[in-house]
Image: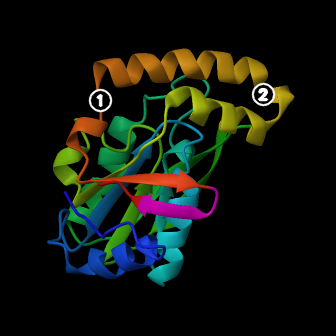
Amino acid sequence: MIDDGGAPGAPEALAARLPLLTPSVGPVRLVGVDGHAGSGKSTLARRLATALPGTPVLRLDDLASHDAFFGWTDTLLDTVVAPFARGREARHPVYDWHRRAFTGSATLPPAPVVLVEGVGAGRRAVRPHLALLIWMEMDPQVAWRRGRLRDGPEQATFWEAWERAEAHHFADDPSRPFADILMTSGGDSHHACE
Protein backbone atom coordinates (compact mmCIF):
# COMPACT_ATOMS: atom_id res chain seq x y z
CA MET A 1 0.00 0.00 0.00
CA ILE A 2 1.42 3.39 -0.96
CA ASP A 3 1.16 6.00 1.77
CA ASP A 4 1.78 9.61 0.80
CA GLY A 5 0.62 10.88 4.19
CA GLY A 6 -2.58 12.39 2.82
CA ALA A 7 -0.86 15.72 2.14
CA PRO A 8 -2.95 18.36 0.35
CA GLY A 9 -0.81 17.83 -2.78
CA ALA A 10 -1.35 14.06 -2.65
CA PRO A 11 -2.28 13.59 -6.34
CA GLU A 12 0.70 15.65 -7.47
CA ALA A 13 3.05 13.76 -5.15
CA LEU A 14 1.59 10.46 -6.34
CA ALA A 15 1.94 11.51 -9.99
CA ALA A 16 5.64 12.17 -9.48
CA ARG A 17 6.07 8.57 -8.30
CA LEU A 18 4.20 6.87 -11.15
CA PRO A 19 7.08 6.97 -13.68
CA LEU A 20 9.24 5.20 -11.08
CA LEU A 21 7.01 2.11 -11.10
CA THR A 22 8.08 -0.97 -13.00
CA PRO A 23 6.48 -1.05 -16.49
CA SER A 24 3.54 -3.46 -16.53
CA VAL A 25 2.73 -3.76 -20.27
CA GLY A 26 5.69 -3.40 -22.63
CA PRO A 27 7.18 0.03 -21.86
CA VAL A 28 3.92 1.29 -20.27
CA ARG A 29 2.96 1.59 -16.63
CA LEU A 30 -0.81 1.10 -16.71
CA VAL A 31 -2.38 2.71 -13.65
CA GLY A 32 -5.99 1.86 -12.81
CA VAL A 33 -8.30 4.36 -11.09
CA ASP A 34 -11.37 2.44 -9.89
CA GLY A 35 -14.31 3.07 -7.58
CA HIS A 36 -18.05 3.54 -7.62
CA ALA A 37 -19.64 5.78 -10.25
CA GLY A 38 -19.57 9.33 -8.92
CA SER A 39 -16.64 8.73 -6.52
CA GLY A 40 -14.20 11.17 -8.16
CA LYS A 41 -12.25 8.87 -10.48
CA SER A 42 -12.34 11.21 -13.48
CA THR A 43 -11.29 14.21 -11.42
CA LEU A 44 -8.36 12.32 -9.89
CA ALA A 45 -7.28 11.00 -13.30
CA ARG A 46 -7.35 14.55 -14.72
CA ARG A 47 -5.24 15.82 -11.83
CA LEU A 48 -2.70 13.02 -12.22
CA ALA A 49 -2.51 13.58 -15.99
CA THR A 50 -2.09 17.34 -15.51
CA ALA A 51 0.72 16.74 -13.03
CA LEU A 52 2.41 14.36 -15.51
CA PRO A 53 2.27 16.11 -18.91
CA GLY A 54 1.93 13.68 -21.80
CA THR A 55 0.06 11.10 -19.71
CA PRO A 56 -3.00 9.85 -21.61
CA VAL A 57 -6.22 8.81 -19.87
CA LEU A 58 -8.30 5.91 -21.16
CA ARG A 59 -11.89 6.36 -20.00
CA LEU A 60 -13.63 3.00 -19.66
CA ASP A 61 -16.89 4.82 -20.45
CA ASP A 62 -15.53 4.96 -24.01
CA LEU A 63 -15.42 1.14 -24.18
CA ALA A 64 -18.68 0.38 -22.35
CA SER A 65 -22.17 0.75 -23.79
CA HIS A 66 -25.83 0.75 -22.82
CA ASP A 67 -25.99 -2.91 -23.85
CA ALA A 68 -22.85 -3.99 -21.97
CA PHE A 69 -21.87 -1.79 -19.04
CA PHE A 70 -19.04 -4.17 -18.15
CA GLY A 71 -18.59 -6.01 -21.45
CA TRP A 72 -15.43 -4.12 -22.42
CA THR A 73 -12.72 -6.50 -21.13
CA ASP A 74 -11.86 -8.14 -24.46
CA THR A 75 -11.82 -4.78 -26.24
CA LEU A 76 -9.42 -3.37 -23.64
CA LEU A 77 -7.12 -6.38 -23.82
CA ASP A 78 -7.18 -6.61 -27.64
CA THR A 79 -7.05 -2.95 -28.63
CA VAL A 80 -5.01 -1.43 -25.78
CA VAL A 81 -3.03 -3.98 -23.77
CA ALA A 82 -1.87 -6.10 -26.73
CA PRO A 83 -0.46 -3.17 -28.76
CA PHE A 84 1.18 -1.68 -25.65
CA ALA A 85 2.84 -5.03 -24.96
CA ARG A 86 4.54 -4.66 -28.37
CA GLY A 87 5.45 -1.03 -27.69
CA ARG A 88 2.91 0.23 -30.23
CA GLU A 89 0.15 2.79 -30.02
CA ALA A 90 -3.33 1.60 -29.15
CA ARG A 91 -6.49 2.45 -31.07
CA HIS A 92 -9.84 1.74 -29.44
CA PRO A 93 -13.51 2.42 -30.23
CA VAL A 94 -15.36 5.27 -28.50
CA TYR A 95 -19.00 4.93 -27.47
CA ASP A 96 -21.36 7.89 -27.77
CA TRP A 97 -23.75 7.68 -24.81
CA HIS A 98 -26.24 10.08 -26.43
CA ARG A 99 -26.37 8.34 -29.82
CA ARG A 100 -26.17 4.91 -28.16
CA ALA A 101 -23.56 3.70 -30.62
CA PHE A 102 -19.82 3.40 -31.15
CA THR A 103 -19.24 6.38 -33.42
CA GLY A 104 -15.54 7.09 -33.20
CA SER A 105 -12.13 5.91 -32.14
CA ALA A 106 -9.21 7.19 -30.10
CA THR A 107 -5.49 6.61 -30.19
CA LEU A 108 -3.26 6.21 -27.14
CA PRO A 109 0.53 6.38 -27.37
CA PRO A 110 2.60 3.84 -25.42
CA ALA A 111 3.54 6.59 -22.96
CA PRO A 112 5.56 5.86 -19.83
CA VAL A 113 2.32 6.14 -17.78
CA VAL A 114 -1.22 5.55 -19.08
CA LEU A 115 -4.18 6.00 -16.72
CA VAL A 116 -7.17 3.65 -17.05
CA GLU A 117 -10.11 5.37 -15.36
CA GLY A 118 -13.53 3.85 -14.74
CA VAL A 119 -15.67 1.47 -12.77
CA GLY A 120 -14.03 -1.93 -13.03
CA ALA A 121 -10.52 -0.70 -13.92
CA GLY A 122 -9.22 -3.10 -11.28
CA ARG A 123 -11.23 -6.14 -12.31
CA ARG A 124 -9.47 -9.52 -12.17
CA ALA A 125 -8.86 -9.70 -15.95
CA VAL A 126 -7.14 -6.30 -15.93
CA ARG A 127 -5.15 -6.44 -12.66
CA PRO A 128 -2.24 -8.50 -14.05
CA HIS A 129 -1.56 -5.67 -16.51
CA LEU A 130 -1.58 -2.85 -13.95
CA ALA A 131 1.50 -1.29 -12.38
CA LEU A 132 -0.73 0.29 -9.71
CA LEU A 133 -4.40 0.21 -8.72
CA ILE A 134 -6.01 3.21 -6.99
CA TRP A 135 -9.43 2.80 -5.37
CA MET A 136 -11.60 5.85 -4.71
CA GLU A 137 -12.93 5.22 -1.21
CA MET A 138 -16.55 6.34 -0.96
CA ASP A 139 -19.80 4.74 0.15
CA PRO A 140 -21.66 3.65 -3.01
CA GLN A 141 -24.86 5.45 -2.00
CA VAL A 142 -22.97 8.72 -1.59
CA ALA A 143 -21.10 8.21 -4.87
CA TRP A 144 -24.28 7.36 -6.79
CA ARG A 145 -26.05 10.39 -5.35
CA ARG A 146 -23.17 12.57 -6.58
CA GLY A 147 -23.38 10.91 -10.00
CA ARG A 148 -27.11 11.46 -10.24
CA LEU A 149 -26.67 15.14 -9.35
CA ARG A 150 -23.94 15.46 -11.97
CA ASP A 151 -25.98 13.80 -14.72
CA GLY A 152 -29.36 15.37 -13.96
CA PRO A 153 -32.91 13.97 -13.84
CA GLU A 154 -32.95 13.03 -17.53
CA GLN A 155 -30.54 10.18 -16.67
CA ALA A 156 -32.65 8.74 -13.82
CA THR A 157 -33.62 5.59 -15.75
CA PHE A 158 -30.00 4.98 -16.71
CA TRP A 159 -28.90 5.33 -13.08
CA GLU A 160 -31.46 2.79 -11.86
CA ALA A 161 -30.06 0.18 -14.25
CA TRP A 162 -26.48 1.27 -13.57
CA GLU A 163 -26.69 0.94 -9.78
CA ARG A 164 -27.96 -2.63 -10.05
CA ALA A 165 -25.29 -3.54 -12.61
CA GLU A 166 -22.47 -1.95 -10.62
CA ALA A 167 -23.52 -3.64 -7.36
CA HIS A 168 -23.61 -6.99 -9.16
CA HIS A 169 -20.23 -6.35 -10.78
CA PHE A 170 -18.43 -5.53 -7.53
CA ALA A 171 -20.11 -8.43 -5.69
CA ASP A 172 -18.73 -10.80 -8.34
CA ASP A 173 -15.41 -9.09 -9.13
CA PRO A 174 -14.34 -6.67 -6.36
CA SER A 175 -11.44 -4.29 -6.96
CA ARG A 176 -11.06 -2.62 -3.58
CA PRO A 177 -9.34 -5.55 -1.79
CA PHE A 178 -6.60 -5.50 -4.44
CA ALA A 179 -5.96 -1.75 -4.48
CA ASP A 180 -2.43 -0.51 -3.85
CA ILE A 181 -3.73 2.81 -2.56
CA LEU A 182 -7.08 4.05 -1.27
CA MET A 183 -7.94 7.69 -1.97
CA THR A 184 -10.76 9.87 -0.72
CA SER A 185 -12.33 12.62 -2.78
CA GLY A 186 -13.90 15.86 -1.67
CA GLY A 187 -14.65 17.85 -4.81
CA ASP A 188 -11.25 18.78 -6.21
CA SER A 189 -9.26 17.51 -3.23
CA HIS A 190 -7.95 13.97 -3.00
CA HIS A 191 -6.15 12.37 -0.08
CA ALA A 192 -4.65 8.98 0.60
CA CYS A 193 -6.34 6.99 3.34
CA GLU A 194 -4.33 5.66 6.26
- Give the residue pinned by disc 1: 174
Res. 110 in view: no
- The location of residue 92, given as percent across then percent down, is 47, 53
- The location of residue 127, given as percent across then percent down, is 22, 45
Magenta segment, which residues? 187-191
Identify whether 5 is placed above or below 17: above
Q: Earlier in the sequence, mark 2 or mark 1?
A: 2
Say which quarter of the image contains residue 10.
bottom left
Q: Secondary structure at mark 2?
A: helix
Residue 190 is one of the magenta-drawn residues = yes
Q: Nearer the viewer, residue 151 or 55?
A: 151
* Quadrant of image for the N terminus: bottom left
- For residue 192, side relative to residue 69 (left or right): left
Identify whether 164 is placed above or below 2: above
Q: Nearer the viewer, residue 21 or 113?
A: 21
- Give the residue pinned by disc 2: 155
> Which residue shows up at 20% across the image and 53% down it?
129
Residue 140 is one of the magenta-drawn residues = no
> Which residue shows up at 48% across the image and 81% down it?
51
Res. 8 in view: yes
Distance (Cα) linking label 2 and label 1: 26 Å
